[in-house]
């Protein structure tokens, strides 16, 4: 019979058999899948695993701390955090086009991640064992979608790190390959991961970078982070987390609107609330949130976030609109 306990035991055995005495690396994104995969592998091989977390500055409020502190405390994992905020901001400067932003964020991410990997490999550890494995949080639906293949990840190096091979070849460890999302959450819960990580709503890889319509700047990221945190707080307080699929908050940075705030006229920015219900994100409907909840979110955002003087609601389903604005 299927129990989370059995799944965990079986996977621990399988991971030990696969990895042996070699070392493994795992990238943490802050999302559920990579966190649960890393926790399982950590349980199986302990200090043979090193995790890498790239702080690109596009995370939501508190998320980096959840990984750096809570996840590490819950799992005891060895974590290398790379602060790449400045690098991402510089790369994104002056760019407003959504596809361009996505490309830049993806490219910078691979650069930073590979650099960190190379450093971990070059530093070695006291065992002298090579790093041969890369842990990935691939789920069953991903396996089906991609035709079921597995094997090695051939990750090309885009930069030169002295003395290291140009191409780093890893064998993959994918302990979640047989699981669906809800099962992954159950496994994560059983492994004692923080609630905020296990029940995290889907969040795009490019993060807040694609929730700012216009150029991404530090100031705009800070604004959006605050507005997003308020919306999430109020949705949680209203008990709506399980009801909605996700609720992107989007900063219309290239739009200005007139308001009256405090003792005068302001010329600020609107933010958009995009609450949706969905089964799989392929299609979605806009969530009919209670007016009182919307009112509270709107009042708090316009009171607490400087430069935001208007909150609007997106009432479009997918299709025709995508869930994210970019
Ligand atoms: P759209 O906007 O295409 O989004 O309706 C569908 C779902 O995918 C998420 N999303 C992403 N997730 N990397 C990700 O890991 C991405 O680049 C990305 N873009 C969108 C989005 O939040 C929604 O859940």
Image: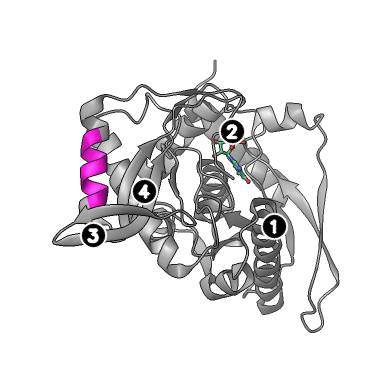
Binning the other alpha carbons within 10 Å of mark 1 as few (below 14), some (14 to 19) or many (20 upward) gives: few
Q: Nearer the viewer, residue 57 or 37?
A: 57
The quadrant where ligand 1 appears is top right
Binning the other alpha carbons within 10 Å of mark 2 as few (below 14), some (14 to 19) or many (20 upward) gives: some
Pointer 2 or 4: first along the chain? 4
Question: Label 3 CB, ligand 1: below 8 Å?
Answer: no
Mark 3 or 1, closer to the camera: 3
Label 2 – label 4 distance at C-alpha: 19 Å
Labels 4 and 3 touching (C-beta < 8 A): no
Pointer 3 or 1: first along the chain? 1
The C terminus lies in which quarter of the figure?
top right
Q: Which residue is mark 1?
A: 100
Q: Which residue is mark 4?
A: 228
Residue 115 as seen in the image, left or right of residue 164: left
- Where does the magenta region start and end? 295-302
**Magenta run includes residue 15:** no
Pointer 4 or 3: first along the chain? 4
Q: Is residue 62 visible?
A: no
Q: Which residue is mark 3?
A: 265
């Amino acid at each position: 019979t299927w129990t989370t306990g059995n799944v965990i035991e079986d996977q621990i055995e399988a991971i030990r058999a696969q990895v042996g005495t070699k070392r493994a690396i795992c990238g943490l994104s802050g999302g559920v899948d990579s966190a649960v995969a890393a926790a399982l592998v950590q349980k199986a091989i302990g200090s043979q695993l090193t995790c890498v977390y790239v702080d690109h500055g596009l995370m939501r409020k508190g998320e980096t701390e959840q990984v750096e502190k809570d996840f590490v405390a819950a799992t005891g994992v060895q974590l290398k955090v790379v602060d790449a905020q400045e690098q991402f901001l510089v790369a994104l400067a002056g760019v407003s086009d959504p596809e361009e932003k996505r490309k830049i964020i993806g490219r910078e991410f691979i650069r930073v991640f590979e650099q960190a990997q190379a450093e971990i490999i070059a530093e070695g550890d006291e065992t002298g064992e090579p790093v041969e494995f890369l842990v990935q949080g691939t789920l069953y639906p991903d396996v089906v979608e991609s035709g079921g293949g597995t094997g090695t990840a051939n990750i090309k190096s885009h930069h030169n790190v002295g003395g290291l091979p140009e191409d780093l070849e890893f064998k993959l460890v994918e302990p979640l390959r047989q699981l669906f999302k809800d099962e992954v959450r159950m496994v994560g819960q059983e492994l004692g991961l923080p609630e905020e990580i296990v029940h995290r709503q889907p969040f795009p890889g490019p993060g807040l970078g694609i929730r700012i319509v216009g150029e991404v700047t530090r100031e705009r990221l800070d604004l959006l982070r605050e507005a997003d945190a308020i919306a999430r707080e109020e949705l949680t307080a209203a008990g709506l987390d399980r009801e909605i699929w996700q609720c992107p908050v989007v900063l219309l940075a290239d739009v200005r609107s007139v308001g009256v705030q405090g003792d005068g006229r302001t010329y600020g920015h609107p933010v958009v609330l995009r609450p949706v219900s969905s089964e799989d994100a392929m299609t979605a409907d806009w969530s009919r949130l209670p007016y009182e909840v919307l009112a509270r979110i709107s009042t708090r955002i316009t009171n607490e976030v400087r430069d935001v003087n208007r909150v609007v609601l997106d009432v479009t389903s997918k299709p025709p609109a995508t869930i994210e604005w970019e």
